[in-house]
Amino acid sequence: MTESTKTHVILLSCGSFNPITKGHIHMFEKAREYLHKTGRFIVIGGIISPVHDSYGKPGLVSSRHRLTMCQLAVQSSDWIRVDPWECYQDTWQTTCSVLEHHRDLMKRVTGCILSNVNTPSTTPVIGQPQNQNPPIYQNHINDQIKLWGKISESLGKICCVRPHIERFTFVDENANLGTAMRYEEIELRILLLCGSDLLESFCIPGLWKDSDMEVIVGDFGIVVVPRDGADTERIMNHSSILRKYKDNIIVVKEEMNHPMSIVSSTKSRLALQHGDGHVVDYLSQPVIDYILQSQLYINASG
């Protein structure tokens, strides 16, 4: 496949990020590396979407803190950004609604309909406006970053992109963006990035609506980075919907017992509470500094 005919992917990860760990960032990096190795995909961006405060998880600190920690964790990344839309809603949002929000947002920014798993788009999508030269897209990794930068620049008109640490700006999505530009044809998809624990939760009766699972797995598709040697094949066989859309689930293969595969927010909170020096293995230093400064996770209640 030529570079321009590969499917361009934005990886979206939803979760508490309480706090965000090195394992979360590792998940993005491993997923991008694996998708590139397949020869079918080019990952042009990653989005971290922390959950709303009303999710109700015990020990969940304020979204103000979680957003800031996430921003600190990705401040050196040129392709992962933090999006506060989910946190800024009136109440908790389903994963399905978050995916649909970002799909609709990309549609508005690019003037196109994004492709689903089974219905590739024939509509002109992300790329260089046809009446400009030279083309923004060329055959190397730096231009993928430029492409994501182009999208992020447009997103900045209607949502938060790389906000200042202390202040998150959120502009009305209904603002007039002017006439959409025409783009050369490049297929773009948003894929849900998750660990095997979220995949396994699909098998818990009543936890997920079947209609939401149909959209998440059937329309969007998911990329799974297994944690701690999880048997993803067994997990998928436990759910009729996961079996039905098995071809839409991409499982990232990596070496067994990778140190980052066992890192979790729970372990990080426990390490902080007990003054365990191993916390530096779980969290980046800017995140640790912010946690100590803000006196977060000092006691068992978070």
Image (cartoon, helix red, strand yellow):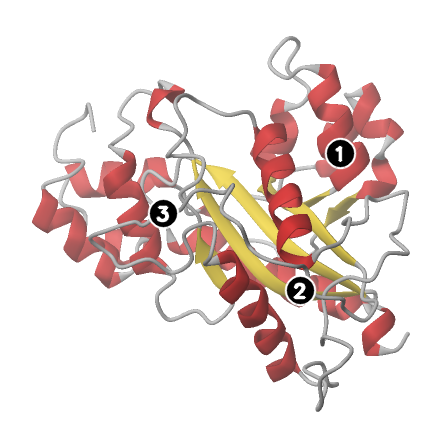
Residue topped by disc 1? 217
- Along the viewing direction, whichever of 163 and 260 lies nearer the viewer: 163
Q: Position of residue 1 (x, y in %)?
A: 91, 74
Q: Residue furthest bottom?
A: 134
Q: Residues within 10 Å of mark 1 (few under 14, many from 20)?
A: many
Mark 1 and mark 2: Cα distance apart in space: 19 Å
Rendered image: mark on residue 43: 2
Q: Nearer the viewer, residue 255 or 117?
A: 117
Which callout, 1 or 2, points at the residue further toward the start of the chain?
A: 2
- Amino acid type, residue under disc 2 in the picture: Val
Q: Which residue is mark 3?
A: 20
| Gap in angstroms between the C-alphas marked 3 and 2 | 21 Å
- Residue at figure coordinates x 34%, y 35% from the top left: 266
Please indicate, yes or no, whether residue 255 appears anywhere in the rendered image.
no
Query: On the rendered structure, is 288 left or right of 163?
Result: left
Q: Is residue 218 above or below residue 41?
A: above
- Residue 226 percent coordinates (x, y): 62, 45
Q: Nearer the viewer, residue 184 or 46?
A: 184
Residue at the location (69% across, 37% down)?
231
Residue 32: image location, x then y, percent: 64, 63
Q: Quadrant of residue 205?
A: top right
Q: Amino acid at mark 1?
A: Val
Amino acid tagged 3: Ile
In what element is the residue under mark 2? strand
Label 3, label 1: how far apart the Cα atoms are: 25 Å
Position of 180 compared to 56: left or right?
right
